[in-house]
Image (tube, helix red, strand yellow):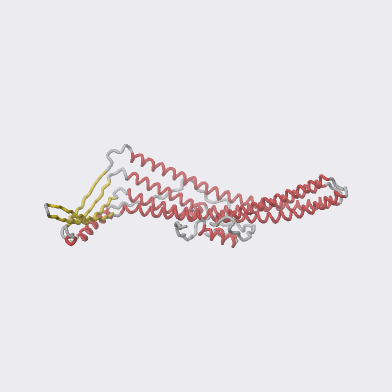
Amino acid sequence: MTIASAFTTTLGILCTYALSGCVSVEPHDVKPPIEVPDSFSARGAEPLADRWWLSLNDPNLAALIEQAMADNFSIRSAWDRLTQAEQTAVKAGTGLLPSATYGGRARRTRQDVDSRTDYTSNYSVSAAASYELDLWGKIRSSRQAALLDAHAARDDVDTAAITLSAAIAQTWYQLAEAREQQVVIQQQIEVNRKVLEVVTLQFSKSQVGAADVFRQEQLLESTRGGLIQAQERTVLLEHQLSILLGKSPGSWRPETPRLIAPGRLVTIDIPSVVLQRRPDIRSRYTQVQAADMRTASAIADQYPVISLTAGVETSAQKTHDLFDDWLANLAANAAGPLFDAGYRKAEVLRTQAVLSQKINDYSQSLLVALREVEDAIQQEKHQHQTVRNLQKQLELARQVYDRTRQNYLKGQLDYLRVLESLVSQQSLERSELTARRVLMERRIELCRSIAGGWPIARPEQAVLTQP
């Protein structure tokens, strides 16, 4: 028998022990520690796609979000964290199989005796294998915990993608509002300028006092100040959108967004289905299971460790004689804690506290998720009412301004009444735009709170580049 076949035989013996020593370790199902309601306060009728933003019917926004899924650096970091978790799980599982090593040594000895010099050579080759019998499930529990960490990290990628897509959509419509505010304010500037011309003309005819002119000039300048603020907000939002897309601020200008109205209310499943779909909830759930597995591993670490070792070694003075004689050994070892000053017991108590924390975190995340959905439903409902109310106010304000302006020109009212109605109308025009933008944000928040994951291509890992 050669040394290779001998080592293969001993390695096979260890594998047999490995398979016979396996302990079945499976994560426990986690029952929701809170009472989940049977339904939300609204259902909706419009199906929500996995890519939730498609329900907004905004092709320009959809193109931006798809681009960001590949280029945003926060998403790339989430993928890197997933890869780390996956490889940690691979490392944790290596203890379930025997480990094997090899070694070789060559030695040359010179000895001078009187006038004669003798040279002696020695060569040796060895191979060794070892395996820890996982009788109590310590290694298997650690590996299962690492696998669950990897599953949680995958759900974290989906959570990051949902958060990013919602942030892009919100910034997109904030930018749409800012640009439309500029258009509205420019129209208001033109109206205020024409009113100033009328007031100035009446002042030249001694029909109004100088104070009326100054008031109108002040309103004109105030409106111009509002335009400056809207322009600043537009630039800052463009920068923010660039960062979300993984681009340098100022290097890219988006297509002109439009402030659209949300369609019919999207379909809202029963709470239990929504919670199962949400990746952040799945991640919390998996973290509870991983903590439970680590507790099992800590408990098993209190028991004796039984390991098997096998080795084969050969040596000779000439390389071609190396495998003529060889020595093989197989040994079993047992070791366990005799006195560790309470170290292992403390580790068990620590992991149990971690498990308790994860359960509480999971419970809190369930409550927060349910609140987010209900809040979004109610906020969208009331924001619809707010928009309709402002539109009605704006319609009445325009009528008031038209009447007061006509009466002013007829000399039936003083200028302050006209100024008051004009300021009210222009304020409502801006508020109505903001309210419509907030309504879109309410719909985005509702979609975010009930959305699940969708297939995302894993990007290549970043590497250092030489300057």
Q: Is residue 42 left or right of residue 333?
A: right
Judge left or right: residue 117 versus residue 151. left
Q: Is residue 115 visible?
A: yes
Question: Closest to the observer: 29 or 252?
Answer: 252
Residue that appears at 49% across and 51% down: 280
Is there any visible trace of residue 389 in the rendered image? no
Q: Position of residue 54 (x, y in %)?
A: 57, 60
Residue extending farthest to the left is 114
Is 416 in front, or is 292? 416
**In the image, is 327 to the left or to the right of 159?**
left
Q: Nearer the viewer, residue 20 or 99?
A: 99
Image quadrant where residue 80 sits:
bottom left
The furthest residue to the front:
115
Residue 194 rendering spot, x and y as whole percentages? 79, 54
The quarter of the image holding the N terminus is: bottom left
Residue 57's image quarter?
bottom right
- Residue 350 at x, y = what percent? 39, 41
In this rendering, position of residue 244 left or right of residue 205: left
Q: Nearer the viewer, residue 277 or 148?
A: 148
> Residue 34: where, in percent of width, then height?
48, 45
